[in-house]
Amino acid sequence: MVKSFKLTVNDREYIVEIGDLSESPLIVKVNGEAYRVEVEHEAPGPTPAPQPAPVAARPAPPEPKVAPPPAAPRAPVFPKPGAKVTPGAVCAPMPCKVLEIKVKEGDKVKTGDALFLIESMKMEITIPAATDGIVKAIRVAVGQTVTQGTPMAEME
């Protein structure tokens, strides 16, 4: 039986699906990506007397022992045909709402550094820098809803 959990670790949400815990290794899916996980079981002790099934809510499951996978840089998304885009533009990869702007104009960034946190289809997604550079201009505001291909920042 597969169990699904929504976990928040350091303010990031993960959807975790866990199979039969009696198996080792077991397959654990984190945000749809499968991982093989070795499970160590404690040595069995004396068998306790049978207890009635608890009626109250169960305690929270233990925290996972595996660190979530690092976010992979996303492939560039090209703007819609006819849109005016300057060279070095960072464009919205999909229709989204800007939740956070993680840089300011003049900041030096390296490939993979977080530029924006967006929300699309109830998922929070970090938009990374595609290359090393300097943030020349920010073209969006927190709370703004944009369409796919909208220039969000300009890099030099």
Image: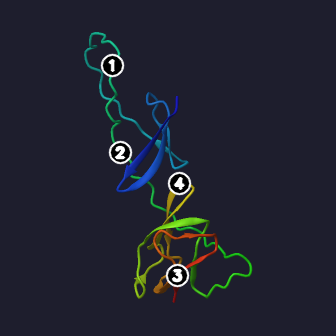
Q: Is residue 26 left or right of residue 60?
A: right
Location of residue 151 by image quarter: bottom right
Q: Residue at x 28, y 13 (%)?
A: 47
Q: Residue at x 33, y 38 (%)?
A: 62
Location of residue 93 by image quarter: bottom right
| Above or below: residue 50 compared with residue 12 | above
| Above or below: residue 34 compared with residue 49 | below
Asked whether the beta carbons under mark 2 and mark 1 sit within 8 Å of each other, the answer is no
Q: Secondary structure at mark 3?
A: loop
Residue bearing the label numbered 4: 122
Camera-near label (4 vs 2) is 4
Q: Nearer the viewer, residue 7 or 143?
A: 143
Percent of width and height locating residue 52? 32, 12
Q: Which mark is residue 54?
A: 1
Residue bearing the label numbered 2: 65
Please report whichever mark, 4 or 2, sits nearer to the chain's N-terminal start: 2
